[in-house]
Image: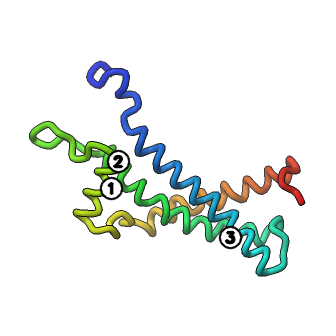
Amino acid sequence: MTEEGVTGLWAGAVPTISRAIALNVAMMVSYETVKERLSASTGKPASNFGVQVQASMVSAVCTACASLPFDNVKTKMQKQKPNPDGTMPYKNFVEGFTKTAAREGVTGLWAGLPTYYFRVGPHAIITLLSLEFYKKMLGVGQK
């Protein structure tokens, strides 16, 4: 803290928050959308456990695909070391995206997707099914 000052405590906060927003928005929106569409197409209620499992599995894929670019840039920013002239390779999150896309191509933002899916996928599935369990226990959203 003496080298970076008080603001050093929040270094990396913007990339971390951005990744968290992307992950949670993708997870919740895709889950509810898929759950509603599965319910409509199968005729089973959205409260059906099979519908919820299938929706959570699809959501896990959407979550990984939507949040990986943010995770890749976040990781690069957290690991960056000063250039020989003392400047940092990435000044901000947007520059991290543009430099990564320019250097590795747009698909470089999704480097490591299979590995990332196996880390984030189970998290999304467990989180979403736990949410349904607690909603049921509390009687929230019951039709």
Name the amino acid, label 3. Val
Closer to the chain start, of discs 3 and 1, is 3
State if disc 2 and disc 1 touch (CB < 8 Å).
yes
x, y percentage for residue 69? 40, 59
x, y percentage for residue 18? 46, 47
Secondary element at image label 1 = helix
Name the amino acid, label 2. Phe
Query: Residue 138 or 26: which is nearer the viewer?
Result: 26
| Residue picked out by circle 3 | 34
Give the residue furthest to the top: 2
Name the amino acid, label 1. Phe
Residue at (51%, 59%) from the top-left corner?
119
Q: Which mark is residue 97?
A: 1
Which quadrant of the structure image shows residue 31?
Answer: bottom right
Residue at (39%, 28%) from the top-left corner?
9
Secondary element at image label 2 = helix
Give the tally of numbered discs: 3
| Residue picked out by circle 2 | 93
**Is residue 101 positioned above or below 137 on the image?**
below
